[in-house]
Image (cartoon, helix red, strand yellow):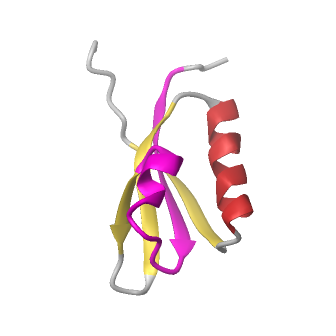
């Protein structure tokens, strides 16, 4: 089972206020189409499910979840 951290982009409807960045532990990017992309590293599947639960708890519609190229600095 792969337990390495991975990079993710989670896209949600609407522009979230910047203060949510700390709660999510990710960088927020306001897109021109009126959505917000949360970008960052997620440590494992449990953390990913926790992140998605936060999106649910906030009540904002989830648009997509995409893995990104999170390179391991150790090689």
Q: Vertically, is 12 above or below 70?
A: below
Residue 7 lies in the magenta stretch? yes
Residue most toward the top?
Answer: 74
- Residue 8, given in percent of the width and then of the height, sits at 47, 47
Q: Vertically, is 60 above or below 75?
A: below
Q: Nearer the viewer, residue 22 or 12?
A: 22
- Residue 16, given in percent of the width and then of the height, sits at 47, 71
Q: Quadrant of the C terminus?
A: top left
Residue depicted at 33% across the width and 84% down the height? 32
Residue depicted at 52% across the width and 49% down the height? 24
Q: Nearer the viewer, residue 75 or 16?
A: 16
- Which picture quadrant has residue 18? bottom left
Residue 73 in view in this figure = yes
- Which picture quadrant has residue 73? top left
What residue range appears in magenta? 4-26
- Residue 69, given in percent of the width and then of the height, sits at 36, 41
Left or right for 75, reference 40: left
Q: Nearer the viewer, residue 8 or 50?
A: 50
Residue depicted at 59% across the width and 19% down the height? 3
Residue 67 in view in this figure = no
- Residue 40, given in percent of the width and then of the height, sits at 41, 44
């Amino acid at each position: 089972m792969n337990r390495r951290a991975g990079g993710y982009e989670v896209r949600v409807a609407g522009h979230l206020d910047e203060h949510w960045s700390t709660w999510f532990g990710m960088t927020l990017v306001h897109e021109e189409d009126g959505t917000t992309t949360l970008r960052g590293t997620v440590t494992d599947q449990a953390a990913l499910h926790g992140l998605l639960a936060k999106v649910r708890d906030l009540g904002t519609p989830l648009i997509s979840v995409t893995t990104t190229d999170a390179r391991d600095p150790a090689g």
